[in-house]
Image: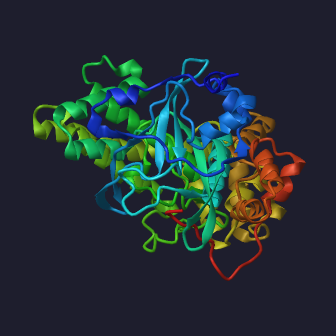
Amino acid sequence: MTEKKAIIESGWNFDNSYTRLPKSFFTRLDPTPVRSPKLIILNDLLATSLGLNVQALQSNDGVAVLAGIQIPEGALPLAQAYAGHQFGHFTVLGDGRALLLGEQITPLGERVDIQLKGSGKTPYSRRGDGRAALGPMLREYIISEAMHALGIATTRSLAVVTTGESVFRETEQPGAILTRVAASHLRVGTFQYVSKWGTFEDLRALADYALQRHFPEIYAVESRYLYLLQEVIKRQAVLIAKWQLVGFIHGVMNTDNMTISGETIDYGPCAFMDTYDPATVFSSIDINGRYAYSNQPYIAAWNLARFAETLLPLLHVDEAQAFKLAEDAISDFTELYHRNWLAGMRAKLGIFNEELQDESLIEGLLSMMQKYRADYTNTFRTLTFDKPEDTVLFGTTEYAQWHELWQARLGRQQEEKAASHQLMKNSNPALIPRNHRVEDALEAMVKQGDYSVMERLLDVLSSPYVHSPEQADYSSLPSLSNRPYQTYCGT
C-alpha cells in the first residue's frame, strides 16, 4: 500500500475556502516536523462523525498527519491573521502556534475547520516558540468535550499527540499537538484585523464569507451585514447564558477568543466554579477580575460592540446612520442574554411557565448560596432530587422560607411534579469537570503516563444529565486548601 493511498483511506475530504479570501488574511505554511510523535488520545466518536477512519488515524501515517509531519491530500495549511483586545488593550495577533489544515467536508455535508494547535512557529508567533505542552492540550480536550456533553456550543478535540520533544515554560514539559475541530476559526479579532489593516473590499469579502459559512439563509438579504451583526449577538447571548447556568468561567474573554459561529473557543485559564461566588476568578493574570464570573455577560457585550465597530462601513453609507444601527443592535444583547439566562434558571428549578416573581425567587436562592458558600452545581442537584439535607442551606430559616415559596410556585403550574423533576434532571448536570478531578487526571497522565484516570473522567463527563451512581464520586468537593485554585495562560 502506498503512503498516498493510506492517507486517502483515512477519510480526509478537504476543501480550502479560506485560502480563496484575500492573501493578507493568512500565511500559507506547513507545520514544523516533530521528532517522534505518539498518539495519546483519539476521539473515536467525533472522528467517525467527521467521516474519518479511526483505525487509519491510529496508524503511523495517521499519527503523522495529527503531528503535522504529513499533509493529507487536499489540505493547504495556513496560519490565520487576527487582532484583538487583550484585557482591553488592542494588539495585532494571529495563529502563533496553530495551523489550519483545511476544512473537512463531513458525510452530512457540513464544513468544519481542522486545526493543529502546537504545530510550530508562524509569522504571528512573536516571542513564542509555536509549541504547546501536553498538560494544557489534554486540559482543552477534557473541558471542550465536557462542554459539548453539557449541550454548550464549543470547538471539539479530535486528538492529542506527543511530539517527542520538550517545551519550556516554568519547567521542562513534554510537547504535544492538539487537533481541534471548529465550525470555523472566524473571530471578532479577525474582523478587527481586517477593519484596521484591510480595505473596504477586504472587509466586505470577510463579512460575505462569514455569512456564507454560518448564516447562508441571510446571505442574499439586502441588509445582510446588519443581520450578520444581529445573528452573532443572538448566538453569543445564548452561549454566555449557558456558561453562567453551569458555572463556567472562560478566564480570558479577549475579542480574539469570541467566535462568529457562537462556539466557545480557547480553553486556557478556564475552570468551573465550585462555591457560588459571582466574583470568582481563576486566571492568575486577571488580577482585577475583568473576566470574573459575574462580568462575563458585560464583557460579551463589550466585545460585541467592538465587532459592531468593524462593520460600520458595511451597515450604511451614512456614518451616523451606521452607528445608530450598530448601537441599536448591541443594545439588544442585554435583554437577549437575560431572557436566555432566566429561561435556563426556570428550567433548573423545574418551572415551565413565567411569572413576574420568578426572578426574585431565583435571586433569593443565589443570594443564600453566596451567603452560605454553597456549591453551585451540587445545590441544584440536591434540589432536583429533593435532598435539601445534602446542602449547607438546609436548616436555615432563609432556606425554609425560600423552599416554601418555591413549592408554592411549582404548585401554580399545570405540569405534574414528575414533569418538573425531569425538567430539572435535564437542566442540572450531575457533575462538571471539577478542577481537582481535572488536575488529578492531568497529573496521572503527564507524570505517570497513566491514562486510566483521564479515561474514567471522560467517561462520566460524557453523559452529565444521566445522574448515574457512577457519577456520584465525581460530584464530591475538593479538600479544603489555603490556596485558591488558579489557572494559567500561555501554556
Reply above or below: 446 against 1: below
Tell me if I can see residue 445 in this picture.
yes
Q: Quadrant of residue 275?
A: bottom right
Please tell me which residue is depicted at 80% across the width and 54% down the height of the picture.
Answer: 451
Residue found at the far right of this picture: 469
Q: Is residue 58 left or right of residue 473?
A: left
Reply above or below: 321 against 380: above
Colouring method of the image:
rainbow
Q: Is residue 249 left or right of residue 55?
A: left
Q: Is residue 138 left or right of residue 309?
A: right
Residue 81 in the image: x percent, y percent? 34, 45
**Which quadrant would the N terminus be assigned to in this image?**
top right
Please tell me which residue is depicted at 46% across the width and 35% down the height of the picture.
Answer: 184
Residue found at the far front of this picture: 2
Residue 459 in the image: x percent, y percent? 80, 45
Residue 129 in the image: x percent, y percent? 46, 60
Tell me if I can see residue 355 in this picture.
no
**Which quadrant would the C terminus be assigned to in this image?**
bottom right
Q: Quadrant of residue 321?
A: top left
Q: Quadrant of residue 434?
A: bottom right
Q: Is residue 92 left or right of residue 394?
A: left
In front: 73, or 296? 73
Please tell me which residue is depicted at 78% across the width and 62% down the height of the picture.
Answer: 444
In front: 216, or 128? 128
